[in-house]
Amino acid sequence: MAASRLPPATLTLKQFVRRQQVLLLYRRILQTIRQVPNDSDRKHLKDWAREEFKRNKSATEEVRTKSWIQSG
């Protein structure tokens, strides 16, 4: 059996698509936050979104990430 030519850090197609969905969600959230009129509320929401995405950056469970994308 031949060894894979891909490096071990290469994403599968499913992981790649999920990553693109998460990035699109993040961009949409930031675009929506830009429409908030109050500066302090806008900053708070932006910080909150950034922290949530950082906190869940290493999440790999497909069911959990899929539910986050749907609820987003």
Image (spheres, helix red, strand yellow):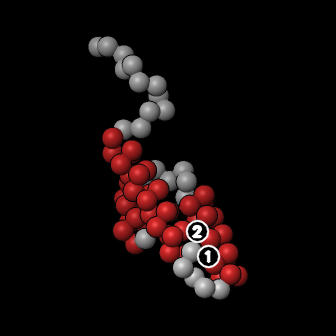
Quarter of the figure that contains the C terminus? bottom left
Q: How many marks?
A: 2
Residue 65 occupies quadrant: bottom left
Question: Does residue 64 appear anywhere in the picture?
Answer: no
Kindly identify which numbered label has been placed on residue 25. none
Mark 1 in CB contact with mark 2 (< 8 angstroms): yes
The amino acid type found where label 2 is placed reads Ala
Residue 51 occupies quadrant: bottom right
x and y percentages locating residue 4 in the rendered image: 37, 20
Residue 5 occupies quadrant: top left
Tag 1 secondary structure: helix
Q: State the residue position of label 1.
A: 45
Q: State the residue position of label 2.
A: 49
The amino acid type found where label 1 is placed reads Leu
Query: Mark 2, residues whose alpha carbon is within 10 Å: few (<14), some, or many (≥20)?
Result: some
Whole-angstrom CA distance, mark 1 to mark 2, is 6 Å
| Relative horizontal placement of residue 55, taking residue 11 as reference (left or right) | right
Q: Residue at x 36, y 68 (%)?
A: 70
Q: Residue at x 60, y 85 (%)?
A: 37
x and y percentages locating residue 21 in the rendered image: 39, 56
Q: Residue at x 62, y 71 (%)?
A: 46
| Relative horizontal placement of residue 52, taking residue 44 as reference (left or right) | left
**Relative to 7, is 60 above or below?**
below
Residue in the foreground of this view, choosing between 11 and 41: 41
Residue at the extreme left: 1
**Relative to 33, is 64 above or below?**
above
Tag 2 secondary structure: helix
